[in-house]
């Protein structure tokens, strides 16, 4: 298979994820061409990355047959850029969320449908190695019918996507309740790196209950959790025959035989291992429930998941279609409405729910 050729519209923090992936896995990806309108960002990218830098989308597409284009821009700017690429017949992998609010999402979805565009969204969390392994276990039937998923691993639409996929929910409506709690926390790292001194700040934690008429989704998250060293993720998935609690899996082999297993990560580069430093896969008992599609590239779990999206896009798959992205952002917006009002809210069927 020839290497994947793609372009990126945008030169912000998230755009660099795609560049790191391309640099770490040159057997899969060519270094992309990047549209950077801001001269300072363009210079910074040119200094850091061996990629072509152009000022406009027209220049990105001129004489360059691309497998797809990534849009990594602000919420407000994204819809028009996606539409422009769709008009040109370019497959699009757009950053999250696809549009800022409900009306903008409906307009964008209708436009893409009318023009028969291929638009996926770069929602990577459900493709991270751990969550891919968990979904494999769920789909195996070991846990039976899933009734509850509790997720504390991501905020907003990211968390909604995880919770919905673990529950096996599509576009069903939900009754939502929400609360929040604030407590002090020592500040940890941020996008700019580790802290230089100790400081304590208030950390707001939000709790959301989504009742999908008999299946319960619960999500909580605090703003510091992505980077803070002392705030860990938590996952609970419950089915009629078993449950997953973080890395522990319990299920009934038969009515008298409970099975207890742990998820085990296989990583290269440990003592006595000369394969390099990368994740190989995840094991449950005698089965490998996840194999890293980008091994032996030295990438974080988040980057592996984004790279997996890119591989799937190049194969003309739809790993996370626009309709799902709109639904998850809509659920996130309704959760915020419930939190701000202090009252339960009920979601309504949206146009994309016919997918």
Image (cartoon, rainbow, N blue to C red):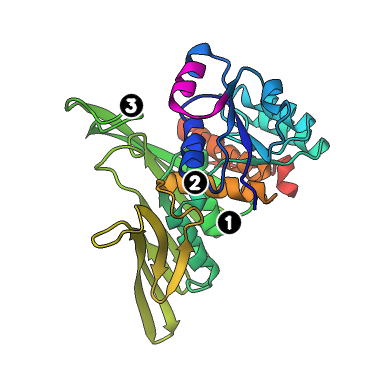
Callout in the foreground (1, 2): 2
**Front in this rendered view, residue 121 or 316:** 316
Give the main secondary structure, helix, strand or loop, of the magenta stretch.
helix
Q: Is residue 136 above or below residue 49?
A: below
How many residues crowd around disc 3 within 10 Å: few (fewer than 14), some, or many (20 or more)? Answer: few
* Total numbered circles: 3
- Mark 1 or mark 2: which comes first in sequence? 2
Q: Is residue 310 left or right of residue 280?
A: right
Q: Are marks 3 and 1 in contact (CB under 8 Å)?
A: no
Task: Measure how far apart labels 2 and 3 are at the Cα level.
Answer: 25 Å
Position of residue 252 measured from the top left corner of the image (x, y, whole percent): 42, 79
Callout in the foreground (2, 3): 2
Mark drawn on residue 313 = none
Position of residue 120 measured from the top left corner of the image (x, y, whole percent): 65, 42
Q: Is residue 227 left or right of residue 312?
A: left
Give the residue pinned by disc 3.
192
Give the residue pinned by disc 1.
213
- Mark 3 or mark 1: which comes first in sequence? 3
Q: Are marks 1 and 2 in contact (CB under 8 Å)?
A: no
Q: Is residue 49 magenta?
A: yes
Span of residues in magenta: 42-52
Task: Measure how far apart labels 1 and 2 are at the Cα level.
Answer: 44 Å
State whether residue 215 appears in this view.
no
- Residue that appears at 63% across and 53% down: 170
Give the residue pinned by disc 2.
25
In the rendered image, the residue lying farthest to the top is: 39
Instruction: Label 1: state its secondary structure.
Output: loop
Position of residue 354 measured from the top left corner of the image (x, y, whole percent): 75, 48
Q: Is residue 173 above or below residue 263?
A: above
Position of residue 167 measured from the top left corner of the image (x, y, whole percent): 53, 58
**Front in this rendered view, residue 169 or 339:** 169
Instruction: Label 3: state its secondary structure.
Output: loop
């Amino acid at each position: 298979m020839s290497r994947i050729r793609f372009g990126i519209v945008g030169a912000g923090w998230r755009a660099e994820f795609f560049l790191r992936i391309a640099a770490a896995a040159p057997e899969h990806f060519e270094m992309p061409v990047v549209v950077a309108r801001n001269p300072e960002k363009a210079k910074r990218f040119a200094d850091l990355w061996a990629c072509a830098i152009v000022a406009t989308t027209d220049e990105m597409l001129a004489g360059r047959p691309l497998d797809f284009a990534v849009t990594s821009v602000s919420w407000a700017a994204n819809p028009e850029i996606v539409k422009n690429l769709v008009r040109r017949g370019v497959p699009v992998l757009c950053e999250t969320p696809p549009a800022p609010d409900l009306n903008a999402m409906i307009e964008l979805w209708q436009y893409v449908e009318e023009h028969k565009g291929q638009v996926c969204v770069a929602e990577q969390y459900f493709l991270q190695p751990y969550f891919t392994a968990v979904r494999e276990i769920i789909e195996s039937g070991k846990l039976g019918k899933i009734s509850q998923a509790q997720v504390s691993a991501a905020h907003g639409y990211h968390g909604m996507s995880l919770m919905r996929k673990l529950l096996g929910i599509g576009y069903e409506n939900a009754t939502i309740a929400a609360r929040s709690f604030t407590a002090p926390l020592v500040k940890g790292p941020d996008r700019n790196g580790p802290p230089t001194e100790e400081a304590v700040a208030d950390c707001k934690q939000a709790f959301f209950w989504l009742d999908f008429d008999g299946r319960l989704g619960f999500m909580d998250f605090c703003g510091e959790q992505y980077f803070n060293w002392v705030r860990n993720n938590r996952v609970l998935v419950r089915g009629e025959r078993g449950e997953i609690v973080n890395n522990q899996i319990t299920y009934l082999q038969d009515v008298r035989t409970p099975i207890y297993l742990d998820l085990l990560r296989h990583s290269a580069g440990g003592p006595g291992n000369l394969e390099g430093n990368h994740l190989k896969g995840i094991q449950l008992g005698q089965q490998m429930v996840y194999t890293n599609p980008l091994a032996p590239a030295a990438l974080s779990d988040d980057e592996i998941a984004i790279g997996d999206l890119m591989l799937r896009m190049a194969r003309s798959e739809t790993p996370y279609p626009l309709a799902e992205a709109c639904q998850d952002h809509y659920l996130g917006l309704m959760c915020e409405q419930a939190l701000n009002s202090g009252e339960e809210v009920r979601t309504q069927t949206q146009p994309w729910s016919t997918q």
